[in-house]
């Protein structure tokens, strides 16, 4: 896996995971894998995130572990040092972009407007995160920009459910979608990894 475009082909749904406790990292990764999902976007939204990435990279090497919510330049190197195999950003600044390039890792930079997407394409980035998907116009928006921007592919994320996922996946400019519903807070709090496996099994068939 060497490019952002490769990332879009790993799974129909890329789970977007928020962990409060690094002890949940390995069981969550194993549950997703058992359900047929081979990739995780572990978001840097909690103090447990980097340790979670480190544990998954060390103990569940079969899953492709990436870091999401890379919003500051230093996050890129921290995530790479923890063992992340790719990076995801919700939006983009030049400094974050430079730091992501410096790691040598494939990454999905975030865009939610045509101009942002065009700027990223100018830097050779043609596989993009579309965030926040539903709030930014959802399926209709992505369909509309497919005409003028035929070379770009997206991973829409934000507000997508198992019910709305097929509408996104049917678009020719969507490679995969990001989903947070596979690892809900209540299941994690209850350590109900069977529930996570069941959501993963359903999502892997989309
Ligand atoms: C991120 O936080 O990176 C997303 O994918 C939204």
Image (spheres, rainbow, N blue to C red):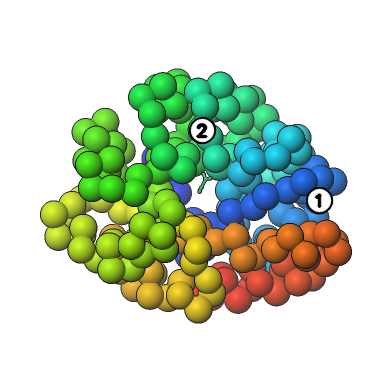
| x, y percent for residue 106 | 44, 36
For label 2, being within 8 Å of ligand 1 is answered: yes
60 relative to 173, above or below: above
| x, y percent for residue 1 | 46, 42
* Residue 104 visible to an observer of this rendering: no
Q: Is residue 150 left or right of residue 194?
A: left
Which SS class for mark 2?
A: loop
Dot 2 alpha-carbon crowd within 10 angstroms: few under 14, some 14 to 19, many 20 or more: some
* Residue 169 visible to an observer of this rendering: yes
| x, y percent for residue 83 | 65, 32
**Badge 1 vs badge 2, beta-carbon distance below 8 Å:** no
Residue 146 occupies quadrant: bottom left
Residue on which the image places disc 1? 24
Furthest toward the left, the residue is 148
Residue in view at x 50 percent, y 23 percent: 73
Q: How many marks?
A: 2
Q: Is residue 58 left or right of residue 87?
A: right
Which SS class for mark 1?
A: helix
Checking the image for residue 1, the label placed there is: none
Q: CA distance from mark 1 to mark 2?
A: 24 Å
Q: Is residue 45 left or right of residue 118?
A: right
Residue 140 occupies quadrant: bottom left
Task: Please name whichever residue, 16 or 6, is drawn nearer the observer in this view of the structure.
Answer: 16
| x, y percent for residue 117 | 27, 43
Checking the image for residue 71, the label placed there is: 2
Residue in view at x 52 percent, y 27 percent: 72
Residue 200 occupies quadrant: bottom right
Residue in view at x 74 percent, y 35 percent: 47
Q: Is residue 145 left or right of residue 197?
A: left
Residue in view at x 40 percent, y 43 percent: 110
80 relative to 143, above or below: above
């Amino acid at each position: 896996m060497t490019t952002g475009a490769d990332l879009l082909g790993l799974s129909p749904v890329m789970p977007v995971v928020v962990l409060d406790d690094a002890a949940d990292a390995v069981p969550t990764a194993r549950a997703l894998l058992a359900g047929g999902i081979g990739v995780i976007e572990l978001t840097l939204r909690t103090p447990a995130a980097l340790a979670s990435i480190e544990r998954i990279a060390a103990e569940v090497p079969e899953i492709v572990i990436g870091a999401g919510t890379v919003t500051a330049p230093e996050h890129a190197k921290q995530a790479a040092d923890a063992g992340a195999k790719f990076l995801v950003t919700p939006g983009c600044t030049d400094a974050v972009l430079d730091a992501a390039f410096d790691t040598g890792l494939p990454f999905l930079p975030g865009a939610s407007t045509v101009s942002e997407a065009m700027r990223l394409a100018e830097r050779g980035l043609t596989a993009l995160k579309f965030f926040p998907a539903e709030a930014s116009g959802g399926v209709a928006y992505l369909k509309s920009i497919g005409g003028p921007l035929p070379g770009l592919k997206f991973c829409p994320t934000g507000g997508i459910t198992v019910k709305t996922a097929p509408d996104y996946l049917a678009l020719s400019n969507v490679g995969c979608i990001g989903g947070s519903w596979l690892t809900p807070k209540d299941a994690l709090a209850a350590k109900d990894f069977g529930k996570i496996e069941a959501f993963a099994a359903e999502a892997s068939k989309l």
